[in-house]
Amino acid sequence: MQIWVYIALVSGFLGFYTLFIDINIFIKILAIYGFLNCFLSSCPLISFKDYPILIGCIYLYWLLTKLKHWEIIFKLILTLVIFNLFFVIIQLLNKDSLLNWGLSKNLVEGTLRNPMQLKSLIIVALAFIIAYKKPKFIKNKWFIVLLIIGSISYLFFHKVFHYFPLIRLGAWKEAFRIYLLHPLFGWGMGSFKFIFPALSEGYFKGEGLWLQAHNDWLQILFEMGVFGFLITLAFVGNLVIRLRKYFYILVGLVMIVFDMMVHFPLHMISTVLIIIAFLAYCNKEVLDVR
């Protein structure tokens, strides 16, 4: 029997074991549903290989809820942002002799190679920093005005109003059309990068190969079906209700939710770890999620 079969079985066991640990009820349901979803998947080999990652994230979240001193997590996340910005500056100067040897085009895959992924990292990291440090200037009306003006300016300068209807919206419509072929349980965990390129009707050739939906909410629906989507939505809705009195953490949550609508932070190793830390911080410091 191949080693991945044992890994899948152990992961399934750990998924069911969440019934007996102190963790959010919707996460318990997601852990067990995720294992069931692998059996119903159109790409079971891919789903069974991705399921251990889901379980690893769930248990990391559970362990972080036990953490008493969060300053080290804050410093690690802040360092990650500074470290990435350092490389951005070095690469803008064409002096990066470590990752791309001073060339104007990066040779290295990952956050630095993709400005969109870098933006996602900064947004998610700032969400945690705001929730943790609670900067008072965020409540200042002039800061809110400047933020709105800056956001609108960014949308115009980057031609978002032109690009999104032309490319993203078309891709999302196509992904939703394909999702409707398997509406209840979806195509299976991790299936998007295989199913969408195979079944999409040829759009987006100028955009390269779409391995992610660039919308985590839609991708959850596509891969996990309506049941997986509702479980995720119930978890977030429950979180919002419990966070309604905690302004700064709620601001951070809104930032992450928004980023998930236009990027794919749940499918980037750097951002998903920060999101897990953010959710664990909500649980440990503010909420009684049991």
Image (tube, rainbow, N blue to C red):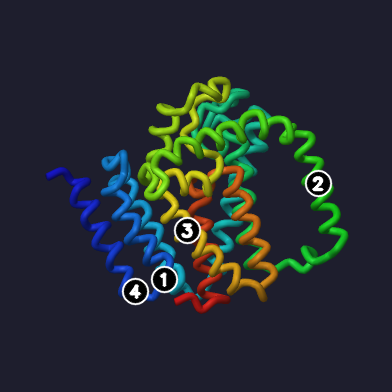
Pair 2/1: label in front: 1
Q: Which residue is mark 4?
A: 21
Q: Could you tell me residue 20's position as x and y percent?
A: 31, 74
Q: Earlier in the sequence, mark 4 or mark 3?
A: 4
Which residue lies at the image location 61% right of the left edge and 61% below the top edge? 253
Q: Secondary structure at mark 4?
A: loop
Q: Could you tell me residue 95's position as x and y percent?
A: 63, 30
Pair 3/1: label in front: 3
Tell me the amino acid under the disc marked 4.
Ile
Q: Secondary structure at mark 2?
A: helix
Tell me the amino acid under the disc marked 3.
Leu
Q: Which residue is mark 3?
A: 230
- Residue 117 in the image: above or below residue 225: above
Q: Which residue is mark 2?
A: 150
Which residue lies at the image location 61% right of the left edge and 43% below the top edge? 262
Distance, label 4 to label 3, CA atoms, is 22 Å
Distance, label 3 to label 1, CA atoms, is 13 Å
Q: Earlier in the sequence, mark 2 or mark 3?
A: 2
